[in-house]
Each structure stands twice: as C-alpha cells, then as structure tokens.
Image: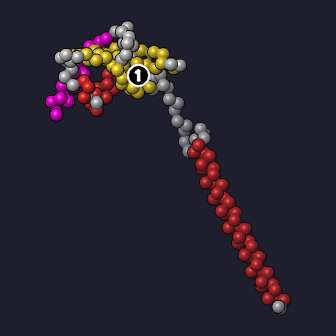
Amino acid sequence: MTPMARETSRAVLGRAILGRAVLGRAVLGCILIVLLAAVAGCSDFDFWGKPEKAVDPNAFPEDYKKDVLTYVKTHPRELLNAREASISTPALKQFGTQSRYFACLRVNGPDWRKEKMLVFYSGGINQFIDAEGDQCSAVAYQPFPELVTEISELKGKK
C-alpha cells in the first residue's frame, strides 16, 4: 500500500470513528432529553408554568343547591313523583379519620319518603347516598321547592 493510500484510509477511518462518536453523542443527548422530560412529568415541580393550585377537600360547597339540581337532572329516577323536598345547610362531619362537608336531603312522595346524604369534596358532590340510622336526625331542614319543580319538569319531558 502506498503512503498516500495509507493516509487516505486513515482519514476515512478517522472520519468514520468521528461520525460514530458524533452520532453516539446525539443519541445519548436525545435519550437524556427524554429521561429529563419523563422525570419532570412525574415530579411536583412544574417546568412549564405555574404549579397547580392545591385542592382543599373541605372547601365549603357554595352552590350546593344548584349542584343537587344538576345531579337530579342526570339521576332523576329514584325521586320521581316527589311532592315535597327539604335540604339542610352543609356542615362538617367526621367520616373515619377525615372531616367532610355533608348535607341531608329529604324528599316526600305520595306514599314514600327518602332521606339522602350528600357528601362534598372540594365544594362538589362526591357521594349521593341513602342516609342510614340517625345520620340526618339532628339537621335543620329548609324547604327546597326548586327540586320538586325540577323533577316535575323532567317528568313532563318524558
């Protein structure tokens, strides 16, 4: 092999090695960027803007009556034929190890009466369940004629 051929093959070999090194660094850089994005997505630190506002599980349910009416629009079946409704003002109650706002709903029909307990989380209805035992015995009910009107309107649409 001539000296010039040796130089040319060394240059070609050098460029090939250098090309692989650059390619390897580019691949490594891409992998690092993906890993950093994954770690940032899983962390509490928000790189892209303001951190999310903390949720207060015991925020007072300001629009509780409106929320009940909205709930009943989507789940009217068990309250059809209601003639009278009453609701209590939300109050804090201990549920296990945590406190949550709750309200009681009493609905009377022609030959039935139902008491429901509404449990709120962060100001919205989280549970709409049958009241058991004396869960709603000590609450002060207020008339809630809007519920009867809403149920009547839903019944008329069918």
> Along the horizontal axis of the image, is 93 left or right of 108?
right
Which residue: 83% across, 91% down? 2
- In the picture shown, does residue 139 fall above or below 43? above
- Work out whether residue 86 or residue 128 is closer to the camera in this orientation and state it: 128
> Along the horizontal axis of the image, is 122 left or right of 8?
left
Region in magenta: 141-158
Q: Amino acid at mark 1?
A: Val
> Along the horizontal axis of the image, is 147 left or right of 49?
left
Q: Is residue 155 magenta?
A: yes
Q: Position of residue 27 (x, y in %)?
A: 65, 62
Q: Is residue 51 magenta?
A: no
* Quarter of image, res 62: top left
Q: Is residue 112 visible to us here?
A: yes
> Along the horizontal axis of the image, is 51 left or right of 68?
right
Which residue: 16% across, 34% down? 158
Q: Residue furthest right?
A: 3
Q: Position of residue 91 (x, y in %)?
A: 42, 15
Label 1 packing within 10 angstroms: few (<14), some (14-19), many (20+): many
Which residue: 40% across, 22% down? 119
- In the picture shown, does residue 134 fall above or below 53? above
- In the picture shown, does residue 73 fall above or below 99? below
Q: Position of residue 103 (x, y in %)?
A: 37, 17
Q: Residue furthest bottom?
A: 2
Screen quadrant of the N terminus: bottom right
- Work out whether residue 83 or residue 40 is closer to the camera in this orientation and state it: 83
| Helix, strand or loop for the magenta stretch, by majority | helix
Which residue: 43% across, 19% down? 101
* Quarter of image, res 88: top left
Q: Secondary structure at mark 1?
A: strand
Q: Which residue is mark 1?
A: 119
* Quarter of image, res 108: top left
